[in-house]
Image (spheres, rainbow, N blue to C red):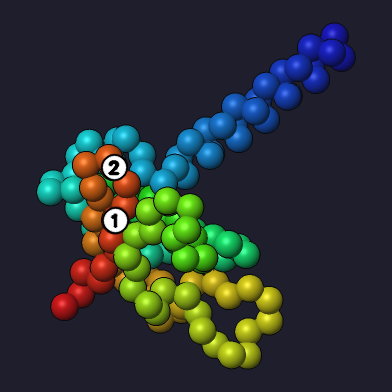
Amino acid sequence: MQINKILIVSFLAFFITACYTSNKTTVSSKVAKTLANNEVEAIYLECTVYASTTIFHFKDTIKGDSIDVSVFSEPDTTGVFVPKMPKNMIDDDPNLEGLPGANPKMIGKKFIIIYNNKKEVIEVKSSEK
C-alpha cells in the first residue's frame, strides 16, 4: 500500500511539472496558429538572466498564453538565430547585487512579438509609438 502512495505522488508531481513546463514554451502552437501576419501583442512580465542566455517572459494580451523569448548573450557563432530586442529590457542599474532582472520601467508595457514562418521569434518591438 505504501508503494502505491509513493507511485501516485510521484506521478502527480511529474504530471504537474510537465503541465507547468509545457505552458512555458518559447512559442506554443496554440499561439502561433492564431497569429495574424505572424505578430502577437504581449505584455512584458519579467526576464531571467543566465550566464549565456536571457529569457524574456511575456503574456499574450488576447489569449493570456505565456510566451518566452530566449536570447543568447554571446554573438551568434553557433548558427542559432538571435531575435532583435529593444535595448532597455534588462535593468541596467549599476548598484544591482547579483544578476539583473527586468527593467522596472518596462514591466507591464505592451510589445509586438514577430514570428517567421518557422514559428521562431525574429523580433520584439514596443507597441507604443
Q: Residues within 10 Å of mark 2 (few under 14, many from 20)?
A: some
Residue 17: x, y in percent? Answer: 60, 35
Q: Quadrant of residue 30?
A: top left
What residue is disc 1 on?
122
Question: Mark 1: which amino acid?
Answer: Ile
Q: Residues within 10 Å of mark 1 (few under 14, many from 20)?
A: some
Q: Quadrant of residue 123?
A: bottom left
The residue at 55%/87% (across/down) is 93
Q: Nearer the viewer, residue 42 or 71?
A: 71
Q: CA distance from mark 1 to mark 2?
A: 9 Å
In the displayed structure, would residue 20 be above or below residue 78? above
Residue 25 in view (yes/no): yes
Q: Quadrant of residue 70?
A: bottom left
| 79 on left or right of 101 | left
Residue 90: x, y in percent? Answer: 47, 75
| 109 on left or right of 36 | right
Residue 48 in view (yes/no): no
Q: Secondary structure at mark 2?
A: loop
Q: Secondary structure at mark 1?
A: strand
The residue at 29%/56% (across/down) is 122
Q: Give the numbered dot on residue 44.
A: none
Residue 49: x, y in percent? Answer: 57, 65
